[in-house]
Image (cartoon, rainbow, N blue to C red):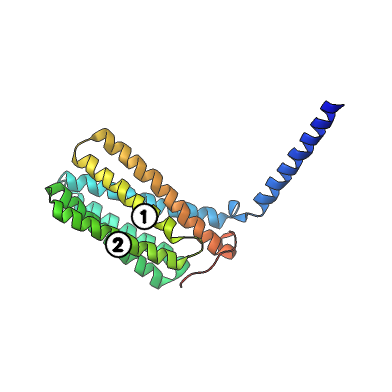
């Protein structure tokens, strides 16, 4: 009799948990919204291009390959693509501003690669400081656009990790530590997917009517 009672209580508890889980999923339409899924896919594609073409440029520049400029041109185009994606949500002015900040991010990264290649420590430190300053500007821009869902501290942590993992990639390749180079890019790639998802999730929550997310607070336009 006691076993049957325990079994009945357990079954009831399981039923409540399942009902709660179902209600939770029903309350989160972002899981089913085709617009939300498309946004997340697009954001992952854009930021994957960002790190793939950054790697292409790093390899070409450090190896004195003639395709370095072509890789850099494609990388700059990626910054325009990201800006255009942001413009569809926050308006053309915001897209233009982010594109400019991201192009500076790439230009300074190029200076950092050149300084590291020539062993110019002073120029390397100067470029690194400018790179982090630019990262702060990107963080401020994004936080202003979506303060509730893109907290400044979270954005700063993500951007700093993006810089540090990219730096590890440059250093490993420069020193011909090929296994470390591969591991460094794996870290870059894993992190950028996390960053892309955090950005798209923030947009989904901020604009629930458009993407089927939870209610958020609109930012600049």
Residue ID at (24%, 58%): 129
Element under label 2? helix
Density class for disc 2 (Cα within 10 Å; few <14, some 14-19, many ≥20) is some
Q: Going from the N terminus, do you reach mark 2 or mark 1 first?
A: 2
Element under label 1? helix
- Residue toward you, 198 or 143: 143
Residue under label 2, please give it: 134
Q: Is residue 39 visible?
A: no
Quadrant of the rendered structure where residue 19 is?
A: top right
* x and y percentages locating residue 168 in the rendered image: 27, 44
Could you tell whether 187 is left or right of 121 in the image?
right
Residue ID at (55%, 64%): 207
Could you tell whether 152 is left or right of 117 in the image?
right
* x and y percentages locating residue 189 in the rendered image: 37, 44
Quadrant the N terminus occupies: top right
Residue ID at (14%, 51%): 121
Could you tell whether 169 is left or right of 49 in the image?
left
Residue under label 1, please give it: 159
- Numbered label attached to residue 190: none
* x and y percentages locating residue 130 in the rendered image: 24, 60
Query: Distance of mark 2 from mark 1, alpha carbons?
Result: 10 Å
Quadrant of the rendered structure where residue 107 is?
A: bottom left
Residue at the extreme front of the image, as rendered: 2
* x and y percentages locating residue 194 in the rendered image: 44, 48
- Residue toward you, 153 or 191: 153
Q: Is residue 76 visible?
A: yes
In this rendering, is residue 67 above or below 186?
Answer: below
Given contact means CB atoms under 8 Å apart, are the residues at marks 2 and 1 in contact?
A: no
């Amino acid at each position: 009799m006691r076993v049957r009672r325990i079994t009945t209580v357990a079954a009831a508890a399981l039923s409540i948990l399942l009902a709660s889980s179902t209600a939770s999923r029903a309350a989160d339409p972002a899981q089913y919204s085709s617009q939300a899924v498309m946004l997340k896919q697009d954001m992952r594609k854009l930021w994957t291009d960002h790190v793939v073409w950054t790697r292409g440029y790093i390899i070409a520049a450090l190896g004195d390959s003639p395709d370095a400029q072509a890789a850099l041109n494609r990388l700059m185009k990626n910054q325009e693509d990201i800006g255009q994606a942001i413009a569809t949500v926050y308006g053309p002015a915001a897209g233009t501003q982010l594109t400019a900040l991201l192009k500076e991010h790439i230009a300074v990264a190029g200076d950092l690669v050149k300084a590291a290649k020539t062993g110019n420590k002073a120029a390397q430190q100067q470029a690194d400081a400018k790179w982090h300053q630019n990262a702060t500007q990107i963080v401020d821009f994004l936080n202003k656009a979506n303060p509730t869902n893109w907290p400044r501290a979270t954005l700063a942590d993500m951007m700093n990790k993006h810089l540090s993992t990219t730096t590890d990639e440059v250093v490993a390749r420069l020193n011909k530590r090929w296994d470390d180079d591969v591991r460094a890019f794996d870290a870059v790639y894993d992190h950028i997917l996390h960053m892309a998802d955090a950005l798209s999730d923030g947009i989904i929550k901020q604009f629930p009517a458009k993407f089927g997310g939870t209610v958020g607070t609109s930012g600049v336009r």
